[in-house]
Image (spheres, rainbow, N blue to C red):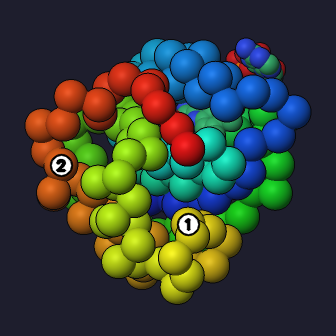
Amino acid sequence: MFITRLIYCSELSGVDKDAITNILQVSRQKNAKAGITGMLLFNGVYFLQCLEGSRDAVNETYHRIVHDNRHSRPVLLTCEELSQRDFTDWDMAYVPWTAEIRSIVRCFSVDDEFDPYKLGAQSAIGLFRALRDRLPDNEFWSKPLQTA
Ligand code: FAD
């Protein structure tokens, strides 16, 4: 069976950045039930998220997400079929904004400041893989901590 991978970006809207705590908690519960894995990067302003799972589950989840009024300007960066997942271990790995993360992100950005709307699809995929590979046992993966 193939896996669908979808990556989008969006911008925090109408709520405080502490809303990430609730977003993550609900996301992880729902994703675990739906067989969705992935990663969410948040710098306090922008979201960049990767969702992986069955085509039906990814579609259903993405449609719910885009109607969420806690963010705005959702833009789909890529949606494609894969033979296997990149993020087998995480219902939704959370990547908080730290100096270490910022230095990795910079390698994939066109500007010094992180702006996911300027990322190409391949850069977004490369960034998620770099985060996964370089920080495998980071204690922050599962905790909503500091943002910019
Ligand atoms: P309900 O819980 O009934 O909520 C309906 C709407 O009410 C929401 O869309 C939102 O606009 C609003 N709302 C809900 N809770 C709050 C709150 N605490 N404060 C303010 N407004 C609220 N869901 C997933 O299942 N998987 C994901 O990977 C995922 N990633 C997300 C990433 C981002 C950046 C955001 C903003 C949301 C994400 N969500 C994710 C949450 C998703 O949008 C839904 O809110 C969630 O799945 C619950 O769906 P529901 O239909 O039960 O909505």
> Residue 60, position in %: x, y?
64, 39
* Relative height, residue 101 to residue 138 (above, below): below
Image point (29%, 31%), residue name: 140
Image point (42%, 40%), residue name: 96
> Residue 3, position in %: x, y?
36, 55
- Residue 38 figure quarter: top left
> What's the mark number on residue 114?
1
> Residue 59, position in %: x, y?
61, 48
Q: Residue furthest left?
A: 137
- Whether residue 11 sits left or right of residue 114 in the image: it is right
* Element marked by disc 2: loop
Q: CA distance from mark 2 to mark 1?
A: 19 Å
* Relative height, residue 15 to residue 82 (above, below): above
Quarter holding ligand 1: top right
For the residues bearing labels 2 and 1, Cβ distance under 8 angstroms: no
Image point (35%, 52%), residue name: 99
> Residue 14, position in %: x, y?
87, 33
Mark 1 within 8 Å of ligand 1, using the beta carbon: no
Residue 15 seen in the figure: yes
Kind of residue at badge 2: Leu
